[in-house]
Image: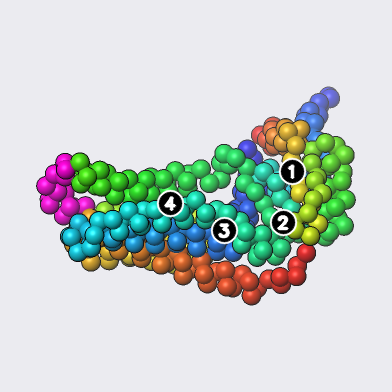
């Protein structure tokens, strides 16, 4: 007697990682943030956050803009349209999975 | 949406709202708005009783307009110097669903209050002011209604976003509305007392919050 395993939805593995999920979820309800806000919200170390942001940027999910506020360097982070769509897709997939 | 997703998004969304209120500048801003509106209404109440010249009311309206034009720039400059270097910067998404209900509620409360002096001024200037003695008697209780509604909304925000000082300001707003209705002799003076009282509450809580915020965070934080 064979029992067919339930079909698992396709999760976006890039977003599925907890730290990156937290970053994307933090960026989702806002237009843009700086590095400090993201660091405080996600409670990640500078190095960790920087590394995860780079991966998200490579995937085209996040747009990083290096600029200055006065004389102080500033990194602005935004979720791209692709990143927003990916997060919505992830939420839908999770919803299907837990239904 | 699942519970897991909902919890995460709710937590993240609320942390953003808490971040926006962490420096107390939004309360200071609304405190200035309400105080100026209260002063304008008080001047109007005095001019209606012919205790001062009517043009003082025009001066107050111009002052209110000047403040409303410049306040956002001033707040942003203070945030750039005080807030962002300490806790970071986040800008709200346009049409952000988080604060939509709150904004609607604020408009519901503030719009009739802002429109009332304009309507009365137009009626006075066109000489169509009806005998409003009975209406004014009832209108005197409008600040009590506004105060209780605004106080309840502030308390609701305190519970939703975990900002405990909003409980205090919510209760004080409700009490101020009732006291203003009891103290005012007509709708204009009662509204003036309420606006000044509400403004004073916001200026006090916002000022204390800003002072504590500056003390709590090192300004040298990158």
Report, in whole angstroms, how far the alpha carbon at label 1 lies from the one at label 4.
Answer: 34 Å
* Residue B138 covered by magenta stretch: yes
Q: Residue furthest top?
A: A1
Report, in whole angstroms, how far the alpha carbon at label 4 lies from the one at label 2.
Answer: 33 Å
- Within-10-Å neighbours for mark 1: few <14, some 14–19, many 20+: many
Q: Are marks 2 and 3 on the same chain?
A: no
Secondary structure, mark 4, is: helix
- Label drawn at residue A78: 1
Secondary structure, mark 1, is: strand
Q: Are marks 1 and 3 on the same chain?
A: no
Secondary structure, mark 2, is: helix
Report, in whole angstroms, how far the alpha carbon at label 4 lies from the one at label 3.
Answer: 14 Å
Report, in whole angstroms, how far the alpha carbon at label 2 lies from the one at label 3.
Answer: 22 Å
**Percent position of residue B75, x then y:** 57, 58
Q: Earlier in the sequence, mark 1 or mark 2?
A: 2
Q: Which residue is mark 4?
A: B65
Report, in whole angstroms, how far the alpha carbon at label 1 lies from the one at label 2.
Answer: 12 Å
The region drawn magenta spans B127-139
- Of marks 4 and 2, the one in the foreground: 4
Task: Report the residue at 76% width, 47% height from top.
Answer: A77
Q: Which residue is mark 3?
A: B74
Q: Are marks 4 and 2 on the same chain?
A: no
Task: Report the residue at 49% width, 59% height from top.
Answer: B29
**Percent position of residue B97, x then y:** 56, 41
Q: Which residue is mark 2?
A: A37
- Of marks 1 and 4, the one in the foreground: 4
Front residue of this view, candidates B17 and B122: B122
Quadrant of the rendering where the N terminus of chain A is positioned:
top right
- Of marks 1 and 3, the one in the foreground: 3
Front residue of this view, candidates B91 and A91: B91
Report, in whole angstroms, how far the alpha carbon at label 1 lies from the one at label 3.
Answer: 25 Å
């Amino acid at each position: 007697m064979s029992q067919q395993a339930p079909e698992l939805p396709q999760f976006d593995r890039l977003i599925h990682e907890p730290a990156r999920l937290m970053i994307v979820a933090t960026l989702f309800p806002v237009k843009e943030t700086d590095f400090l806000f993201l660091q405080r919200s996600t409670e990640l170390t500078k190095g960790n956050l920087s590394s995860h942001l780079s991966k998200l940027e490579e995937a085209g999910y996040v747009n990083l803009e290096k600029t200055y506020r006065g004389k102080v360097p500033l990194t602005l982070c935004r979720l791209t349209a692709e990143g927003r769509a990916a997060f919505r897709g992830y939420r839908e997939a999770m919803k299907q999975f837990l239904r | 949406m699942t519970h897991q997703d909902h919890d995460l998004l709710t937590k993240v969304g609320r942390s953003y709202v808490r971040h926006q209120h962490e420096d107390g500048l939004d309360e200071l801003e609304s405190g200035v708005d309400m105080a100026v509106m209260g002063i304008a209404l008080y001047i109007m109440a005095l001019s209606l009783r012919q205790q001062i010249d009517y043009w003082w009311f025009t001066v107050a309206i111009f002052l209110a307009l000047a403040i409303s034009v410049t306040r956002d720039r001033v707040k942003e400059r203070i945030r750039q110097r005080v807030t962002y270097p300490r806790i970071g910067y986040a800008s709200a998404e346009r049409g952000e669903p988080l604060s939509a209900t709150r904004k609607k509620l604020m408009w519901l409360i503030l719009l009739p209050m802002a429109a009332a002096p304009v309507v009365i001024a137009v009626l006075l200037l066109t000489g169509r002011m009806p005998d409003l003695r009975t209406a004014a008697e009832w209108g005197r209780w409008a600040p009590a209604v506004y105060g209780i509604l605004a106080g309840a909304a502030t308390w609701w925000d305190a519970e939703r976003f975990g900002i405990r000082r909003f409980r205090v300001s919510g209760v004080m707003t409700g009490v101020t509305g009732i006291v203003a209705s009891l103290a005012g002799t007509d709708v204009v003076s009662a509204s003036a007392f309420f606006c000044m009282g509400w403004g004073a509450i916001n200026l006090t809580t916002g000022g204390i919050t800003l002072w504590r915020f500056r003390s709590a965070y090192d300004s040298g934080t990158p």
